[in-house]
Image (cartoon, rainbow, N blue to C red):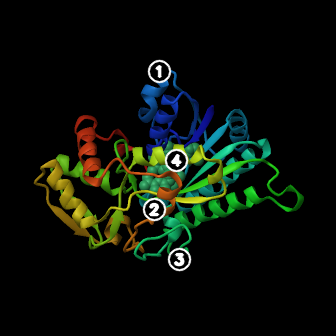
Amino acid sequence: MVSLVTGGAGFIGSHLCEALAEQGDSVIILDDLSTGCRENIEYLSKQGLVEFIEGTVLDADLVSKLVERADRIFHLAAAVGVKLVLERPLHTARVNIWGSHNVLEAAIECGGKTLLLASTSEVYGKQNGECVSEDSLSLLGPVSEIRWIYGASKLIDEYLAQAYLHGDGDDAGASGIRLVTVRFFNVTGPRQTGAYGMVVPRFVQAALRGDPLTVYGDGKQIRCFCHVKDVVRAVMRLVEQPSASGQVFNVGSDEPVTIAELAERVLRITDSDSSVVYIPYSEAYGHGVDDVARRVPDLTKLRKFLGFQHRYCLDDIVREMAEYYAVRGDASLSKPS
Ligand SMILES: NC(=O)c1ccc[n+]([C@@H]2O[C@H](COP(=O)([O-])OP(=O)(O)OC[C@H]3O[C@@H](n4cnc5c(N)ncnc54)[C@H](O)[C@@H]3O)[C@@H](O)[C@H]2O)c1
């Protein structure tokens, strides 16, 4: 099996490449190193387990050549992180929409490929019911709130994927492509950088340094954090299932925690005497952010489809990240955004 992973030098992508190489796949990585880094895949490269191509998914010719060589494509490359999206909304739209368009075009052109599209819980927008299922409505905020460009661009990707899969008129379904969409909910674990606003690495690193843990907003926001290894297992099993094609799956954890509780938990697990400070979003990001009060996935579909069970709880994740950052630090924290 030849697997192409766009965004493979990133956080989730590098864990995925590791698992694919472990199962014997030939792995090609396409990454522009904008938020990912070589260190994430260094040992895989050194052992010759992956072929790394530095380039962008905006380069349609390059994408086309690489897709042609692959049996399966995991499309993870994207502009991500609230901080980055607020600072570079146009870049976000370009990479997330045109990049996905290039990958989809190439996969359809070649035919017979399996494609996994990485989407996000952000496509549910301000939807904050008890838990959101794949059929829940998308309630994106107003266009004046630029942060929604991320969720909107990913939602367009999802519609594009469905349109490509369906095809037009006589061509409908003719490419023989298999396509599955996954909506990730707050994936975290070792190698995730706090540089673009991700909360768990930010808290763990601050706790280890003895710096204050900075909570944005009132800390009552509810989130569920899933270990990247659980996510990778789910993704790898989904692409193996022909009947997953055309479907959308929530992938994450459904163990809810408020951000204030998360901060306390990080302090307890790292045995840190750091303080916890609260700042408004406007101070954190330069202007206000329309945040979502509660984001908990309904995982019924994933559990039924795969019989999926998580191996890690939040305490495991924090413990593992504390061990990781205590030894390694976070080299990518200094990357420009
Ligand atoms: N981590 C999460 O909690 C989460 C949640 C929802 C969705 N996702 C999705 O999962 C995927 C991976 O995210 P991640 O958390 O690993 O973030 P990440 O920033 O570590 O990974 C993204 C990777 O894409 C690369 N990239 C960006 N623009 C590119 C371009 N134009 N061409 C080629 N490569 C490019 C980056 O360098 C990086 O390596 C993304 O599609 C993201 O939207 C992640």
User: Do residues under tags 3 and 1 come within 8 Å of each other at their CB atoms?
Assistant: no
Residues at badges 4 and 3 in contact (C-beta under 8 Å)?
A: no
Residue assigned mark 4? 235
Identify the secondary structure beneath mark 2.
loop
Which one is closest to the eye, mark 4 or mark 1?
4
Instruction: Using the rendered image of the protein, determine whether residue 234 is visible from the camera's viewpoint.
Output: yes
Q: Say which residue appears at 69% left-offset and 39% top-offset.
A: 67
Between the residue at mark 4 and the residue at mark 1, the CA separation in whole angstroms equals: 24 Å
Q: Is residue 35 visible?
A: no
Give the x, y percent position of residue 248: 58, 60
Decide which of tag 4 and tag 3 comes sooner along the chain: 3
Q: What crowding class fits label 1: few (fewer than 14 Cα within 10 Å), some (14-19), or many (20 or more)? A: few
Tell whether 245 sits left or right of 25.
right
Q: Which residue is mark 3?
A: 139
In the displayed structure image, the side of residue 149 where residue 162 appears, left or right: right
Kindly check if marks 4 and 1 are in contact, taking CB atoms under 8 A apart as contact: no
Residue with the mark numbered 1: 47
